[in-house]
Amino acid sequence: MNTPVSLERAIDQFLVYLDVERNLSQLTVKSYREDLEAWREYETLCHSGAAPGPDAISAQELRGYVLAMQESEYSKATISRRLASLRGFYKFGEREGWANGNPTRALRNPRARRPLPLVLSTDDILKLLSAPDLADPLGVRDRAILEVIYSAGLRVSECVGLNFDDLLLDEDLLKIRGKGRRERFAFIGSHAKRALRLYLTTARQYLRDAGATTRRRNRENFADEAPPNRELQHFLEIFLPARAQDAGDASDLPLDETAQEDVDERRRARGLTAQFARELNDPNARARWETFLKEPVFVNKNGGRLSTRSVGRKLEGYIAAQGLDDRVSPHTLRHSFATHLLDAGADIRSIQEMLGHKNIVTTQIYTHVSTATLHAVYERAHPRAKLH
């Protein structure tokens, strides 16, 4: 048995293990830290300001912690997650030698019925997508974000984490780094591509420059005030060429397929045209291009990477303006993406791949369908559903 360690030090060691050895994402490590810090604070209060070492805490004491969470009306999902963090913590402690046994083995998760996800109808989706003001650079950006999340079924963290080298737009794909640092490819549709192009050509450089200089006050002519820089212009010409009806809200207009020329040439060598390839022979030009590819696609009003919380706050305003259910969150767009695909006949295995779920059981929650769809199936299939 090694020298006893304090609870605070043991938690720090465990978090380093998760980050360095397990290579978990920063968001996952942050969740573990919050769960274990909440438990340490509870132990500190229970022991008059001095938490015992992890090896001195019994299963009975941990049951008291679970009871305290229940009395504080924590959800069953939260309690189960915190218990999972404790199990991982003590399993690590057994390996390291500062935990003589694992008291969490005696604990059981509360039985929780997983609620069905909130899903918007297609009409409500259109209301939400039309809410941002396209006369404002932030509105143009928000429209592109909402379109991309719904089109590709992304988590909001995956959307704000997109860099330019993740946009494989000549193939209608996005490279996504999802939970557990698992990578996948997601499809992006024509409406989302047009909204993205409008943002990149008119608003992105305006917001990007705002952080480098001073915050811009005059937004009436934002599209002309800060046109795309050289690298962004090259990117647009290569991967998102101009089509008919690019200006304004043209989401309901058909694409002019004749406007995209030399598709094979653009895709050759991942779209690097001969002229641009010659420019990249200059080491400085290549360095600028490689730096640009690592820049965030979606930026905030100060030019930095947009946060998930900022997207949530903006969405709250659009929901209120459109009179939609105030429970709607950015993740609701992902739920709606999966449910609308399922209602339209997509198979559950394909939806699992598009969502990036590791286990198909996670995806099966979307097997619920609308009452209208069920009614149509019933009338079509039941021999006595109608009088003939």
Image: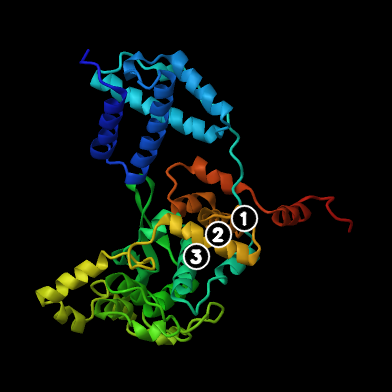
Q: Secondary structure at mark 1?
A: loop
Q: Residue at x 10, y 77 (%)?
A: 282
Find residue 388 and name its label.
none
Q: Residue at x 33, y 78 (%)?
A: 236
Q: Nearer the viewer, mark 3 or mark 2?
A: 2
Q: CA distance from mark 1 to mark 2?
A: 7 Å
Snapshot quadrant of residue 388: bottom right
Q: Is residue 267 left or right of residue 333?
A: left
User: Disc 1 marks which amino acid?
Assistant: Asp
Residue under circle 1? Answer: 326
Q: Nearer the viewer, mark 1 or mark 3?
A: 1
Circles 3 and 2: CB atoms closer than 8 Å: no
Instruction: Compare marks 1 and 3 and give the one earlier in the sequence.
Output: 3
Circles 1 and 2: CB atoms closer than 8 Å: yes
- Residue 256 sits above or below residue 91 on the image: below
Find residue 316 and name its label.
2
How is the rendered protein coloured? rainbow
Q: CA distance from mark 3 to mark 2?
A: 13 Å
Q: Residue 84's spot in the image, x, y percent? A: 43, 29
Residue under circle 3? Answer: 146
User: Disc 2 marks which amino acid?
Assistant: Glu
Residue 153, visible in the rendered structure: no
Q: Secondary structure at mark 2?
A: helix
Q: CA distance from mark 1 to mark 3?
A: 17 Å
Q: Residue 336's spot in the image, x, y percent? A: 57, 57
